[in-house]
Image (cartoon, rainbow, N blue to C red):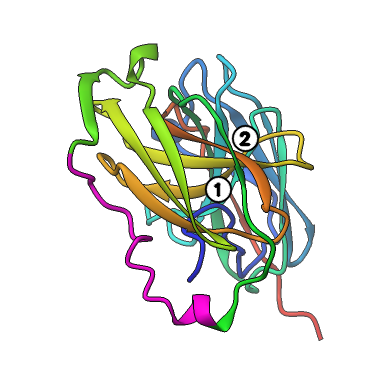
Amino acid sequence: MTRTAATLTALTLALAAGCSSPERDRPGPSAPRLAVSLTSPADAALTWRGAEPKPSGQAVEFATGSGGDYTLLEFVEPERTSYQHPDLMPETRFHYRVRPFYGPASEPIEVTLPPGEFSAKDQADDHQWAPPMKRPGGVGEARPVRTFGAAPTDLSATVMHANGIRFTWTDHARDELGFLLEVKPATARAYRVAALLDPDITSFGLVTLPGEKNASYRIRAYYYGSSSNVVHVTTGKDQP
């Protein structure tokens, strides 16, 4: 079973210097300001000025067609202002944007898993507890997601096996884009996104990664702020 969010590795790179997109792609007053350059014919470097107010995190995205669908590269921490996109496809134009996200988060909970790795028995389990679902009784008084009162409540964790946790919570947001399950392992300094979930979901099962035996979790009802400007580069020829 694979994790449902966070980092997606990319395929390609670019050779022309980045340039701003047309007027329709220019940022709003509080949006990040993005630039891109090539550090090799197949490696792109993104840098940006952060959004204001400070976001809860930022989504770095790319597309290979003008106006096409964007693919998430990674959710990065709010303080981050750079990203490396390596080993890109040759002679391909890549379009990039950064979108800050906001939204109220639940109170965190601590989870300690029992010893053991993801066993053959665990792999044979049908994991019916894991898919995202709308849990009966999982909706409370609905409030706009841009208000503190929209934070999810009653976050609870049930250990299903040595590497599996089922989370449930109560949804109080009426206009969220979805939910972000965030994790901070005991050895980490900050939370990162572990799963991206649809609106109205109130139950989800996570198969943990190594290093998450002892970790803090929270759930966030999120929305995106103003997107950065869109920039692009075109990768060079394939190198011998």
For residue 147, side relative to residue 230 (left or right): left
x and y, in percent, of residue 108 in the image: 55, 29
Please say whether residue 222 is visible from this viewpoint.
no
Looking at the rendered image, the quarter that the C terminus falls into is bottom right
Question: Where are the magenta residues, as a range?
Answer: 121-136
Disc 2, disc 1: CB below 8 Å? yes
x and y, in percent, of residue 11 in the image: 61, 70
Is residue 90 found inside the magenta-colored segment of the image?
Answer: no
Residue for point 42% across, 56% down:
205
Residue for point 57% across, 16% down:
52
Note whether 54 is above or below 39 in the view shown. Answer: above
For residue 221, side relative to residue 87 (left or right): left
Which image quadrant is residue 19 in? top right
Residue for point 25% across, 28% down:
175
Q: In the rendered structure, which disc, 2 or 1, sits on the residue that comes first in sequence?
A: 2
x and y, in percent, of residue 12 in the image: 63, 68
Mark 1 sits on what residue?
A: 96
Mark 2 sits on what residue?
A: 34
